[in-house]
Image: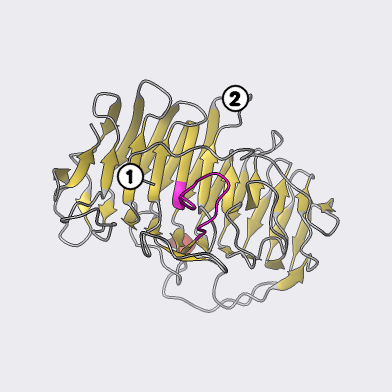
Amino acid sequence: MAIGTKKVQRKNARATYAAGAAAVTITALALSAAPAVQAAPAMAPAALTVGSYKPSASTTGVPAGTVLKPYNTSGADLIITTDGTVLNGLDIYGDIKVRAKNVVIKNSRLHGGKAIPKANTGVVDANSAAVVNLVVQDSTIVPDKPSYYRDGIVGHDYTARRNHIQGTNDGLGIFNRPGGPVTANVTAEANYIHGLTYWSYDPAHSDGTHNDGIQVQGGQNIRIAGNNVVANSTPGAGSAPSPRGTHAGTGIMLQQNVAKLANVVVDMNWVDDGQSSINIDNGKYSNITVTLSNNKLGRNQFDFGSGSKYPVRVVSRAASTVAGLTTSNHWADTQGLLVEGKTGGIRYNY
């Protein structure tokens, strides 16, 4: 897509599907492997302060030394309907459909479904009205069957913490439930998101997939803090190469497709690559208000010609209120403040 054009919301973005195998419904409250065997790192990632370190493969995903137990190896949809279910230390196959409160998925390897989804979903799908306080942490989310319909975690009312997400269409999808409360209630912190999968064919976009590390489409109460988001991509099996090379869409996309944003804070992240690293778009609403603070921006964005790059792109100057934009965001290499201008790191469409 041309940077700054409005990203079309995917049709049926919140639909679920049934895989070829019959869906599996979890009724047990807890499913855990044997106690994890842990290596002894200098400091466990959970003990580190969010934003004080740059997440990587060594500080995210399944903790080193964890012994995983294979689960749901048929690859059928895994439907969770029991409040308080805990999935811990498992090698989980199948797309996970959460339809309950206080579900925890941790210390696990998530493979996703073995079939191509029939509509947009995630390896973890939190779109149900029944979802409250989902936690996905310390897990590796890499789909065995990448698809333009398969994101990492998508929906509302969830916390994603210290996950390693790779090979998905988008890494995280965040929005309030259409027809439901205006709140999204999502926290994403200390995740490592990179290596998304590009598809030259995408039913929603004529120019191929618009892969984003984190795409926010609407809602209130959203905190994105201390993540490392690298918006690069590689073509999926059978796909033509991307016309933008290894650059994906956007590292962190803040766009009002579903609802207006409110109480949205993007703080202390490392963001690089893509057609832009951070994109702020009022979308179909007259104005947008977000906080962008203490982020560290790389310089490896797509070059639109003659060095024209967009680390931080704001679509409309008049429609956008961005707290912290020019006072607290820095270049990752020099620590210098971002300023407006072609080489300054901050640019406006108009």
Left/right of residue 320 with respect to residue 187 in the rendered view: left
Of mark 2 and mark 1, the one earlier in the sequence is: 1
Using the image, tell me which numbered label, if any, was put on residue 77.
none
Residue 34 percent coordinates (x, y): 73, 72
**Can I make out residue 299 in this image?**
yes
Look at the numbered disc 2 and give the secondary structure of its residue: loop
What type is the residue that disc 1 sits on?
Answer: Ile
Dot 2 corresponds to which residue? 181
What type is the residue that disc 2 sits on?
Answer: Pro
What residue is at 28 percent from the left and 57 percent from the top? 301
Q: Report the coloring of the rendering.
A: secondary structure
Magenta-drawn segment: 198-214
Left/right of residue 124 with respect to residue 224 in the rendered view: right
**Can I make out residue 268 in this image?**
no
Q: Residues within 10 Å of mark 2 (few under 14, many from 20)?
A: few
Q: Nearer the viewer, residue 214 or 12?
A: 12
Residue 32 percent coordinates (x, y): 74, 64
Q: Nearer the viewer, residue 124 or 250?
A: 250
Residue 15 percent coordinates (x, y): 69, 40
Look at the numbered disc 1 and give the secondary structure of its residue: loop
Examine the image and state in which quarter residue 128 appears.
top right
Quadrant occupied by the C terminus = top left
State which mark lies toward you, 2 or 1: 1
Left/right of residue 150 with respect to residue 328 in the rendered view: right
What residue is at 57 percent from the left and 53 percent from the top? 151
Alpha carbon of mark 2 to alpha carbon of mark 1: how far? Answer: 31 Å
What residue is at 44 percent from the left and 31 percent from the top? 256
Dot 1 corresponds to which residue? 3
Q: Which secondary structure dominates the residues rendered in magenta?
A: loop
User: Is 247 located above or below residue 4 in the figure?
Assistant: below
209 falls in the magenta region = yes
Q: Nearer the viewer, residue 4 or 167?
A: 4
